[in-house]
Amino acid sequence: MIDIQTFILYGSIFISLFFEVFLLITYLEVREELDLEEKYLGKNIKWFPTVTIIVPCFNEEHTVSNTIKSLLNLDYPKEKFSIIAVDDGSTDRTRRELAKFEDHPQFSVLSKENGGKYTALNLALEQVGSELVGCLDADSFVNPDALKKIVPFFDDATIKAVTPSIKVFEPRSVLQYIQKIEYSWGIFLRRMLSSLGALYVTPGPFSIFRTEIFRELGAYREGHHTEDLEMALRMQKRRYKIVNSHGAHVYTIAPTRLRALYKQRVRWTYGFLNNAIDYREMFFNRKYGNIGFFILPIATISIFSALYLFGNMLWNGLTKVFNTFVKFQTVGLNWKNSPPSFDWYFLNTSTTSFLILTTVTLTLIILYLSLRLSDGKFKITRGIFYYVLIYGFIAPLWLSRAVFSTVFRKKVSWR
Amino acid sequence: MIDSKKYIIAFAITAVIFSTAIFVSNILGQKKLEDTRAIEDRVALDILSSETQFALLEETSCSDIGPGFLSKELGSLGKKLSYAGNQTEFNSNDLEYLKRSYFLLEIKDYLLMKRLTEKCGIKPTFILYFYSTEDACEDCERMGYVLTALRDKYPDLRVYSFDYHFDVGAINTLVSIYKVKPDLPAMIINAQTYYGFHSVEDLEDTVPALQKLAAARAKALETATTSSERTN
């Protein structure tokens, strides 16, 4: 008889493996498409639609100036492009920073009392008359060719939104290096989800929408502090097509300290879980395609299975450390009398260890493909080591907190 | 649109990976058990050979008994079985069987050694050790570390360890002969019973037989050092 713990353990590993295999099959399917996109996307554009980018700001005095400059630097016809910055009741010098650009014909500023990012976006949306509209968080910067790599997708009338590839801006600290690798994995994942029609976030940094969808679906909502996730799910529920342009690069300043990273990720995970609850009717529903049938359920389950696997490994690790400590306390080091000898008998050859080894191998393969997709080539960097060694220990911190807050209905702070 | 074929292929590949992992793990688990069985066979043969030699002793003298008279592999066999007991990949019936024969081999080895002691006046030091795997016995685990350390320190020391609650008639007989109470861990060293945990130092201080071994070891070390100094 298999006991319940073994069942959960095998179940968690099976789900992780299945998801990895599924992603790799998807990659094999879209490989040629990726090559074509890399070669031709953004060249010989015939139609330049009008675009407005909204920059919501709350206390972003250090970064907003560069954000606006990067937008003004975009390689796009000036007469077709405008920027609306919204000062959402900043208490620092953000307003003064924004004022520096006020003479620019493409630029305008709106001010309001602080009400949260979605209220800032909605205020600006009322003023938008362009065909396309997007948002750029005030801590992010765009590559000059980013918009040109997004706009061609709108030639397809069924596509309602396009998301970019988000990268970490000039990593310096260990945590930022870890996030750089994590974001690369995100780039790969988003591109695969795009092909599956299963993107469930239209991220704050530079997702571009057809303006008409806001008339059809309504304005942004609070969305449990993740308005970008809520909007994507609302679109998916209406079967609106969202795709990803992996060649459109946006850089964002990643948190340098664990506390800030923890808060950000608790908010993201909490937002995901609560929006998933709000949109639960999509789960396992074939009507919504891959996103309902597979991606939303697996993304939810993987939060719990990651926590379970981590708990399991932590328990085993601590037991081993404790036993070694007891042994040391009882007989001391005692290594002189027993020289290390290799006997394959004492190698762990359990089914679980083979399965975990396979899962880790597939993860590394996906990581390799992710880095190649995001950076154009694979290079061994210190970030990879930091990521492999540290990420597995810190991610459970926010995952568990977000699950806790969701279960006990506690609000999470947004920054 | 949902591409059912892709889901089926992904499921099939995952299932193949799972089955392969289970299959390989079972094969290796079996191989390990076969290895253990092979060691048991060798130990049994060692004992048989020693017994035969012993029977012949009636006609010859004790001086014919060489240093390899008692099996050397009981210790490593014990280690392997105790490792296997903590793993999940082994067939529990097979493991039970191997443990049963291990305990019996230990008792046979112990009896042979006792007869040898009586007949030839050789006095090997041995410990009969009773532990429990049924109830949480932290001291048993620590005692196990101590005995392993002692065995590493004194290669001539023979430790016979028995699972107190294992259903083998011979263990029960041994328990009743020595009147071992279920107050575990328990040790019998030269007919004296010790209960509870004892550290390496405790045992070396209080057990006369170990004191002798310690003295012999110190002497051997001293001789080795002097001779190496002379060579230099």
Image: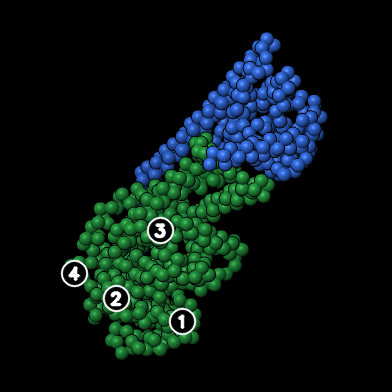
Q: Position of residue B49 (x, y in %)?
A: 61, 17
Q: Position of residue A299 (x, y in %)?
A: 46, 56
Q: Spatial distance from mark 2 to mark 3, Cα to Cα?
A: 37 Å
Which amino acid type corresponds to the residue marked 4 in the rendered image?
Lys
- The letter of the green chain is A
Discs 4 and 3 lie in a common subunit:
yes
Q: Is residue A27 left or right of residue A399?
A: left
Q: Is residue A299 left or right of residue A128?
A: right
Which of the two marks, 4 or 3, is nearer to us in this view?
A: 3
Q: Is residue B178 left or right of residue A141?
A: right
* Secondary element at tag 3: helix
Residue A384's label in the rendered image is 3
Which amino acid type corresponds to the residue marked 2 in the rendered image?
Val
Residue A59's label in the rendered image is 1
- The residue to which callout 2 is attached is A51
Circles 1 and 2, Cβ within 8 Å, touching? The answer is no
A243 or A287, nearer to the observer: A243
- The letter of the blue chain is B
A257 or A56, nearer to the observer: A257
Which of the two marks, 1 or 4, is nearer to us in this view?
A: 1
What residue appears at the point 53 percent right and 63 percent down from the top-left corner?
A398
* Secondary element at tag 2: strand
Which amino acid type corresponds to the residue marked 1 in the rendered image?
Asn
Q: Is residue A207 left or right of residue A230?
A: left
- For residue A328, above or below residue A106: above
